[in-house]
Amino acid sequence: MGRHANFLAGAELHVFPARHVDSILINVPDDACSDSAINSTKRMLEAANPINVILDSGGFQLHVGERDGKKISFDESIPLIRNKLEINIAPVHVMEAAAIIRPDIVVGLDFPIKKNRPKRTRTGIYAQAGIQRSLDQRVLRSLEKAMSGCTIFCANPVLRSGPT
């Protein structure tokens, strides 16, 4: 059935509950939103030397940001942003962070949909979803070699089924 592991979330370099931590959960908006955040995360992981590292996409941070009235966007053409006023994150940002940090497991961001999106025709929504699915599959395939040795989890059944 597998081995059970408790993951430490919210870890920082100088805040560990013990000298050695077996498993650490990090997330893209907190731990990979800038070069300095990535460097800090890498130093923390090097110091902790965990057996398991999970990189989460940051869906919870999106939820909290939306609840708190932050501007939320999913534009891959601009950098990953997380500050007091806005969050911009796209599936490709998660995979780019994973390629740099090289965790054991990656939880991919799939179909981020804002709660208050403008009304569209059914055709428009499905066309947009089809474009996003195709893009996500290309991103996953293009990073497969860079991510050798990592496991990628994705809740989207279309992506789990493989290329179309």
Image: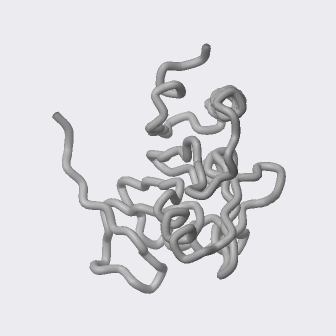
Q: Is residue 92 above or below residue 22?
A: above
As drawn, 6 above or below 164? below
Q: Residue at x 25, y 60 (%)?
A: 6
Q: Position of residue 106 (x, y in %)?
A: 49, 46
Residue at the top extreme of this rendering: 164
Closer-to-camera residue (31/86): 86
Q: Position of residue 155 (x, y in %)?
A: 44, 38
Q: Quadrant of the C terminus?
A: top right
Quadrant in the rendering for residue 22: bottom left
Residue 145 seen in this snapshot:
no
> In the picture, residue 51 is in which quadrant?
bottom left
* Residue situated furthest bottom in the rendering: 14
Which residue is painted at 71% across and 67% down in the image? 81
Q: Is residue 163 above or below residue 99?
A: above
- The answer to whether residue 82 is left or right of residue 59 is right
Q: Residue furthest right?
A: 77
x then y, percent, for residue 40: 60, 75
The residue positioned 60% from the left and 55% from the top of the image is 114
